[in-house]
Amino acid sequence: MMAMDRNRAAGSEGFSLVEVLIVIAITTVGFLALINLQIGTLRGLGTSRSMMQAVNLSEHFIETLKSEGLPWTGDASLMMSQPTVFPHLRLAGNPTAGGGSGWVRAYQSNNSDRRVGPLGTDETWDAGVAMEISPDRERRFCVHYRLTWVVPNYLIRADVRTLWMRDEANVALYQDCPIGMETDLANVASVTIPGTIMRNVFAQ
């Protein structure tokens, strides 16, 4: 008789509705946490990729400035008198210590959207790349640069800042890459790379 009661009790064991709901709730919370972790990881990867491309673009523009400086063999008046040879460096202005250009857009354009891709769009220095890869590819970067005289007539410091809009930003506000957009930290991310351009004292 006691064995029968034990079998009946064992057969009636199961999960109550409350227990099932608790398991479902815990499982759902766990899945939501995993999904949020995955989304955070993907955003982090996207930010890292953008930062890497921005650093490369800044370094590329510094190399453009250095290449432009190769014919700089005289004083600063040489650069200011030849705007086609020195389209960027001429903006350094009069050679006074600490003087310079202030922040300037790196890539000039007649379009309302002045953003560039990660390879740049300079007609002189990036023309070969543009033939292989469309310059419209991933156009989401703004590039600003600033020239400062360190040693008048001999050495210029160049600061190149590459900016891009965060995912949640209103892109229409920054398509023309305005100077000062770097202050909107909620919507704009940026990296700044310094470099130096020296007068070519070896050329005869």
Image (cartoon, rainbow, N blue to C red):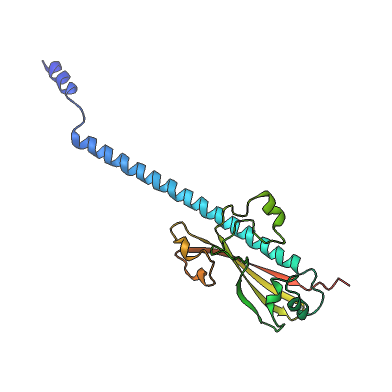
Does residue 50 appear to the left or right of 202 in the view shown?
left
Q: Percent from the top left, x then y, of residue 44? A: 49, 52
Q: Quadrant of residue 119?
A: bottom right
20 or 63, nearer to the observer: 63
On-image quarter of the C terminus? bottom right
Q: Going 18% across and 21% down the picture, which residue do you hit?
A: 11
Q: Quadrant of the N terminus?
A: top left
Please provide percent x and percent y for residue 76.
76, 79
Asked if residue 202 lies left or right of residue 7, the reply is: right
Q: Position of residue 128 (x, y in %)?
A: 72, 54
Give the residue at the far right of this rendering. Answer: 204
Residue in front for this viewpoint, 120 or 7: 120
Q: Residue farthest to the left?
A: 1
On screen, 82 above or below 38? below
Q: Position of residue 139 (x, y in %)?
A: 56, 56
Which residue is depicted at the point 75% across and 65% down?
67
**As drawn, 42 above or below 140:** above
Vertical side of 18 occupied by 65: above or below: below
Q: Residue furthest front?
A: 110
Q: Nearer the viewer, residue 50 or 92?
A: 92
Q: How many marks?
A: 0
